[in-house]
Amino acid sequence: MQKNGIQCSENFYNYRNGSFINKNGDEVFLGHRLKDFFKILIDNKNNVVTRVELMEFVWKEVVVSDESVTKAASDLRKFFATNNITDFKLITISKLGYKLEIIESNQRKTNFIKYLIRTIGYVILVFLLTILIIRAVKY
């Protein structure tokens, strides 16, 4: 972690601007509320941040409902998906809050390999079941 931001495998997050800069130099900005929402999560990465902590930090003196926190989490996930930011995973901890994990590039490769092996396994299973059904119909 650097003083003014976080360098991940694909992106650099700039604390000051609340922006992500990808490897091509393209910069996208978080809105004011999402910037605060992301800041408290990144400051507490790999730890659960409760809904109450999020409300107090992001909305400060404004009274908001749980739906506001849920909407902010949804908006952050959409921001990540829209801007192809795959370095972070926002995990919902039921009835408690959220946890932000930073995904390392080697984790991403491992997840892809697991997905590939699982997919190949399903294809083989479908193939074998098809053969069994064909043989059963012939007899």
Image (spheres, rainbow, N blue to C red):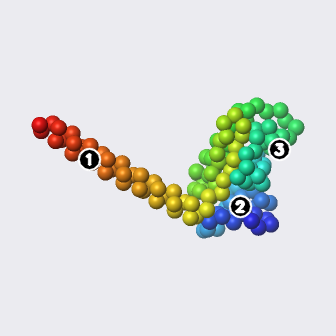
Residue at left 66%, top 53%?
Answer: 101
Q: Nearer the viewer, mark 3 or mark 1?
A: 1
Query: Which quarter of the rendering shows the N terminus?
Result: bottom right
Residue 24 locus on image (x, y percent): 60, 68
Residue at left 73%, top 49%?
Answer: 47
Q: Secondary structure at mark 2?
A: strand
Residue 34 locus on image (x, y percent): 73, 47
Which comes before the other along the chain, label 2 or label 3? 2
Query: Going by the picture, which residue comes out furthest to the right?
Result: 61
How many C-alpha atoms fall within 10 Å of the one at disc 2: few (<14), some, or many (≥20)? Answer: many
Please name the amino acid that badge 3 sits on: Phe
Q: Which is nearer the eye, 14 or 125?
A: 125
Q: Which is nearer the eye, 3 or 99?
A: 99
- The Cα–Cα distance between marks 2 and 1, rounded to whole angstroms, is 48 Å
Q: Secondary structure at mark 3?
A: helix
Q: Which residue is mark 2?
A: 13
- The Cα–Cα distance between marks 3 and 1, rounded to whole angstroms, is 55 Å
Residue at left 80%, top 37%?
Answer: 52
Residue 34 in view of the camera: no
Q: Is residue 118 left or right of residue 89?
A: left
Residue 59 locus on image (x, y percent): 82, 40
Which comes before the other along the chain, label 2 or label 1? 2
Residue 101 in view of the camera: yes
Q: Which residue is mark 1?
A: 128
Please name the amino acid that badge 2 sits on: Tyr
Q: Secondary structure at mark 1?
A: helix
Q: Which residue is mark 3?
A: 57
Instruction: Say whether marks 2 and 1 touch (CB < 8 Å).
Output: no
